[in-house]
């Protein structure tokens, strides 16, 4: 129940390269030794130490993961005033050597980070002012052209967080909550349509059932998957292919 190793693992998810936390702990030592302002010591030193002790206390981890969430405990470190502490101690240390101190702090912070485009596979350089994948924009624009009214469209799971950022008039039978692995555990809810769309093999007989159950007219399907039966056989009409996605409409109403 009280697994301290889990807390360390969550800590690792938050610290990145680790240099900022090391600097923050150094700042706490500096404040403890040299800062005589009681208010600063209370907020930055005692407050940080109390919060850190609370976070590393196994009982707190158990209560959080039991009643809040099992995958977001690393956010507890947001309660620690690391940015304020670094800024406060840093400005005090470099106030007499502003240019040199600033350049030193700048390079320490640069070396302490990682280039976001190479260290995280979920980030990429923006290709347009919307900062949204161009294929997704084309898919949405096409559906807006063929339908004047608001429509319900079931999209491939990897597009869930993108489509409605660009087009709020495309409604879906399931939302981004399906990507939260705690959704079903905490609320006992699962969406059958979403589960069918997640299958590696596309079964249009199952999709027909779900389109009827959720009043869904359009599908955006990843065409890299295997189609195990004919969409036309089950009342679907092919429209267009854009990138790795096919658009079908259900004509069985």
Image: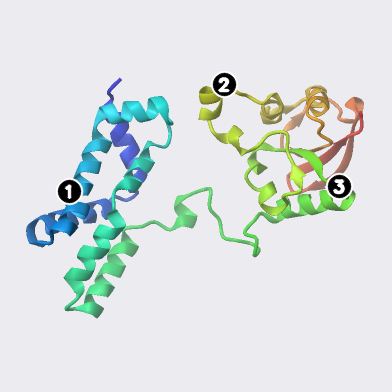
- Give the residue displayed 31% in from the left and 69% down from the top: 106
In this figure, which residue is indicated by the disc labeled 2? 188
Q: Earlier in the sequence, mark 1 or mark 2?
A: 1
In this figure, which residue is indicated by the disc labeled 3? 149
Q: Is residue 119 left or right of residue 213?
A: left
In this figure, which residue is indicated by the disc labeled 1? 46
Q: Is residue 154 left or right of residue 248?
A: left
- Give the residue displayed 36% in from the left and 57% down from the top: 113
Q: Secondary structure at mark 3?
A: loop
Tell me residue 148's x, y (percent): 88, 50
Q: Secondary structure at mark 1?
A: helix
Kindly indicate the quadrant of the structure image that contains residue 77.
top left
Q: Is residue 170 left or right of residue 181?
A: right
- Give the residue displayed 52% in from the left and 23% down from the top: 185
Camera-side residue: 161 or 188? Answer: 188
Q: Earlier in the sequence, mark 2 or mark 3?
A: 3
The answer to whether residue 26 is seen in the rendering is no
Q: Is residue 56 above or below residue 106?
A: above
- Give the residue displayed 32% in from the left and 46% down from the top: 79
Q: Quadrant of the C terminus?
A: top right
Q: Is residue 103 above or below residue 227?
A: below
- Label 1 vs label 2, nearer the camera: 1
């Amino acid at each position: 129940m009280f697994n301290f190793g889990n807390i360390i693992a969550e800590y690792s998810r938050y610290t990145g390269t680790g240099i900022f936390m090391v600097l923050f702990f150094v700042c706490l030592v500096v404040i403890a030794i040299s800062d005589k302002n009681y208010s600063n010591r209370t907020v930055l030193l005692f407050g940080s130490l109390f919060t850190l002790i609370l976070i590393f206390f196994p009982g707190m981890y158990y209560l959080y993961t039991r009643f809040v969430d099992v995958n977001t405990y690393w956010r507890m470190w947001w309660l620690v005033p690391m940015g304020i502490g670094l800024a406060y101690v840093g400005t005090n240390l470099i106030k007499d050597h502003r240019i040199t101190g600033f350049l030193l702090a700048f390079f320490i912070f640069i070396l302490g980070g990682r280039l976001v485009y190479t260290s995280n596979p979920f980030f990429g350089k923006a290709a347009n002012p919307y900062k949204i994948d161009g294929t997704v924009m084309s898919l949405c624009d096409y559906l807006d052209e063929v339908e004047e009214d608001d429509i319900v469209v079931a999209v491939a799971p990897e597009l869930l967080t993108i489509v409605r950022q660009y087009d709020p008039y495309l409604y879906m039978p399931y939302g981004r909550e399906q990507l939260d692995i705690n959704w079903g555990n905490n609320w006992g809810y699962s969406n059958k349509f979403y589960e069918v769309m997640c299958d590696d093999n596309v079964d249009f007989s199952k999709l027909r059932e779900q389109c009827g159950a959720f009043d869904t007219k359009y599908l955006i399907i990843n065409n890299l998957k295997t189609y195990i039966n004919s969409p036309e056989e089950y009342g679907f009409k092919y429209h267009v292919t854009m990138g790795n996605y096919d658009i079908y409409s259900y004509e069985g109403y």
